[in-house]
Structure formats: C-alpha cells, structure tokens
Image: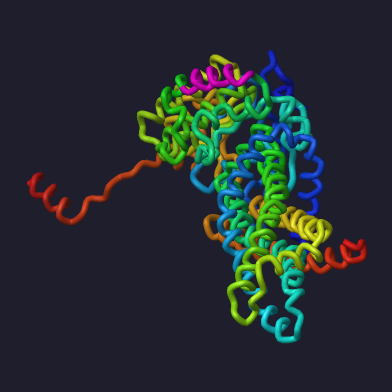
Amino acid sequence: MFRDIGKMTILAWRTLAALPLTFRHFRKVLEQLFEIGNASLLMACILSMFIGGVLALQTGPVMVERGLASVVGAVVGLSVCKELAPVMMSVLIAGRIGSAMAAEIGSMAVYQEIDALRTMNINPVHYLVLPRVIAITIALPCLVLFADLIGWVGGALVSATNPEIAITWQAYFSNLSSVVDTGDVLNGLIKSGIFAMIIGLVSCHQGLATIGGPRGIGRSVTKAVVNSIVLILITDYFITRFLLRMDL
Amino acid sequence: MADSSSSENGKVCVAVRGIRKNFGENEVLKGINFDVRCGEIFVIMGPSGSGKSVLLKHLIGLEQPSAGEVHIDGHAIESPELLSKYRIAMVFQSGALLSSLSVSQNVGLYLREHRLKPLDEIDDIVREKLKIVGLEGAEDKMPTELSGGMKKRVAIARALVMEPQLILYDEPTSELDPLISITIGQEILKMRDETGATSIVVTHDRGLGFGIADRMAIIRHGEILALGTPMQVRNSENEEVQTFLNASFQRQPNDNEQNEEEEEES
C-alpha cells in the first residue's frame, strides 16, 4: 500500500508536469468526459434521489416529533451537499469508472500496447493518464452538483409524502435555501474534485502496474477500487477538518 | 566503441556488450555480445525460451539489463533523448495494436501524436503503407476484426510509417501460414532495400532466418552459440547449433504400419 502511494505520488507529479499539454489532448479529454457522463449520470441520479429520500425518512419523523419540523430541509440539504453526495458519488465513480480505467490500461499493459506506445516515443502518462485524470476531475464535481439537486428533491418528496413527516414542498425548500449557501455546495465540490484526482491517479497507476495475464488485470481492478475508496474515506476526514477550519 | 557503433549514411548501428539479465534467481541472459552493422539484417535465432525476446526488449530500452550495455549509434540506450533523436520501431510478436483504435488510427498514431504531418497527408500515408502490406481497404476495421497475420501486417505498416532507422521484429512469422510468412520475409527485405533501415529480427523460423539474414546469431539458454553469416552459422561445429538447425519431425511408425510394411516387403 505504502509503495503504491509512493509510486502514485510520482505519477501525480508527472501528470501535473504534463498539465500544459492538456490542450493538445483536448479531444481525448472530451472522449473521456463523454464516457464518464454516459456511464454514470443515470446511476448518479437514481442513487442521489434515494440518498436524499432515506435521509429525510430517518431524520424527519424524529425531528417532527421533537417540534423541529422546520429544520428537516436544512439537515437533508447540508448532509447531502457537504458529505453524502461527494462521498457516495466518489464511491460510485470509483466502482464504475475507476475500475474501467484500471482494466483498460491494465489490459494495454499486459498486451504490450503500452510498450508499443513507448517505442513510438509516445509518453503513456501524456497519452493515457493525463486525459483521464483531467476528465474525471471535471466530471465528478459536475455529477456531485447533479446529485445535490436530485438528493434535495428526493428528500423533499419523502418529506411531503410521508405522513409521519408531512412537510410541504415549499416549507422544505424555504428552510433548505435559508441555511444552505453557496459555500456549502462549494465545500462538496472541492472535496469531490480531490476525490476525483485520487480515483484517476489510483486507477491509472494500478493499470500501468499490471503484470501477468487476465488474473493480473482482475487484481489491478480490485486494488484500484479498494484503494480508491480507502483513500477517499481517509482523505475525507482531513479535508473536512481543513475546510471547517477555513470556515467553508 | 566498436566500428559498428558509428553511423554510415544516416543508418543506425547497434553494439551489445555483456548483457546479463536476471529475473529473480533465473539468469535469462548470460553475457551477450554482438554488433549489428549499419543497414544490415541481423537475425537472432534460437529455440523457444532461449531469451531472444527479452534480448530484443533490451535493444529498445523496454527492459533494463542487470549488467552490460546497449549502444545505438554510440549512445547508451538509457539516454532519454535517444528515442527523440533516432526513429526506432518495433514490430511486436502479438502486433500490440491499440485495441481501442481502428487500423488507420493505429498506423497513423506516430505521425498524429507527434504532429509531424497535416491530418489529410497522414490519411494518404496510412493508405499507402497499408497498400504496401496488402491491407488496402482495411482502414476502418478494428484490431479485434483482424486475423493474426493481418494484425502483424498492420504492425509492420505502423512501423513503416515511422520511416525507422532501426527496426526490430519479434517473431514476425509466428502463428502465420507459410505463404504469409514468405510475404512478411519479402516485406522485411524490401523495407531494408528501400529505406536502408538496420533490421534486427528475432525468430525461431529457420526458413525466414536463413532467407533474409545478412548475419545471424544462434542463442540458447541466454548464450550465443554461433555468430556470423548464414553460411558460417550453418557450418558451425557446435553440436547444439546443428541439433537446432537440423531438427525435423519424423513420425515413428506404429505397430500396424510396421506390419503392413513388412507384409509389403515380403
């Protein structure tokens, strides 16, 4: 794990150093963006709808019982945009996109396609890693923004239709909009941007480090997803502390 | 440095000095020395598992030796600017085509990524090179739609596009039928004659090896057993070399066939 983190740091540095070449690989970035959006948008919508819903379902009745019906919108709104949407979307993307990245690059490594790139003096970091990391870093915050909106709607739907909560749509959103501000949404977007870089770098690193045949590819995919999720959850704590200190 | 490490008329020469390679405790290459002269076709032959492909990977820097040096035109293979200074192409055993790209995108990849020509011109060059390897009209096919032989020919077209000064072939005729093998051999000769590229061919196909080589080496268990012109190698007194060169399949007659033969004789 620690050796992986070391190698990943080197990969991160090489990717950062290649950032000026982004425009040159713009087409590949667009292809990756399409791939990520196409594969994840519907899933992200369904997931976030139910996250918002279940959050309202768990907190709503308890709060209404204690006369705190007016803050259900705020609780669901803040939880979704600051924590649940960024983390859950990142976990979803790690499973959906990170695994695909590790598998694709891993099979390229196993079947000598990456060696072929090197012999043509094409840097695999520029050709494969840079477009993927940039695309995922743009796509994940966009998905989180979607997830925020749909999660809030999911919470409002459950709050309005569940007889134990019975908070009107207007009351829910008026409370939500009075408490949740741009900074809270930004907080989640910053987190998701960092998580996206973690997923991209971990997955590409595992792909490039693949050895052996199909079993090696399977191992890389598993490691990419597990390591991404572990790093996301650990990093989440530290980013949250940092952002709280920054008053965001 | 040996004479052969200096270039002649823009052609590239290779010098291999004391290459050793260990994978764990397994010593795959045990001190390999040879020179490849500018513009010649040098064939490395040997049985499967003798270390030929590993040696080839050292010649293009895809593997780092445990000991020893490889020099291309007098420059150490490790030097970072080598691949930008010289055009070195490799035709992999499996073809190593990028499976997400079509045939034309694979063939034009080098020119496109290095932005060496306008896109229209790249398309023309790709068509021309595919025609040379007999694959005109296959531009839009994906690698998964191609047979083993077609993949290899696309890989050769991809190498041709680079107009390489040094080209390395890893088992170019494995998995191919004898007719396509002859075509591939002719392509290797034609490419050398037209471009003057130095060629290193790794193969266990004796027909191909003796057919195209200017000079050759026989390698077994990571050591060179014979080195020289095809004639010198054929006349080598090394027993293992002769065993490899003269090995042929002879069917042992079974009991029924033996009885039939005896009956016929009687």
In the image, what residue occupies the spot 77% across and 62% down? A177
Q: Which residues are magenta?
A: B118-130
The answer to whether residue B32 of the structure is visible from this angle is: no
Q: Is residue A227 above or below residue B199?
A: below
* Place of residue A110 in the rendered image (x, y in percent of width and height, measured from the top left): 57, 49
In the image, what residue occupies the spot 47% across and 23% down? B130
A109 lies left or right of B143? right
Q: Is residue A92 above or below residue B125?
A: below
* Place of residue B200 in the rendered image (x, y in percent of width and height, measured from the top left): 58, 30
In the image, what residue occupies the spot 64% across and 32% down? A120
As rendered, which of A76 and A31 lies closer to the eye? A76
As rendered, which of B19 and B61 lies closer to the eye? B61
Quadrant (top left, top right, bottom left, bottom right) of the N terminus of chain B? top right
As rendered, which of B185 and A170 lies closer to the eye? A170
The answer to whether residue A124 of the structure is visible from this angle is: yes
Q: Is residue B255 above or below residue B249?
A: below
How many labels, in total?
A: 0
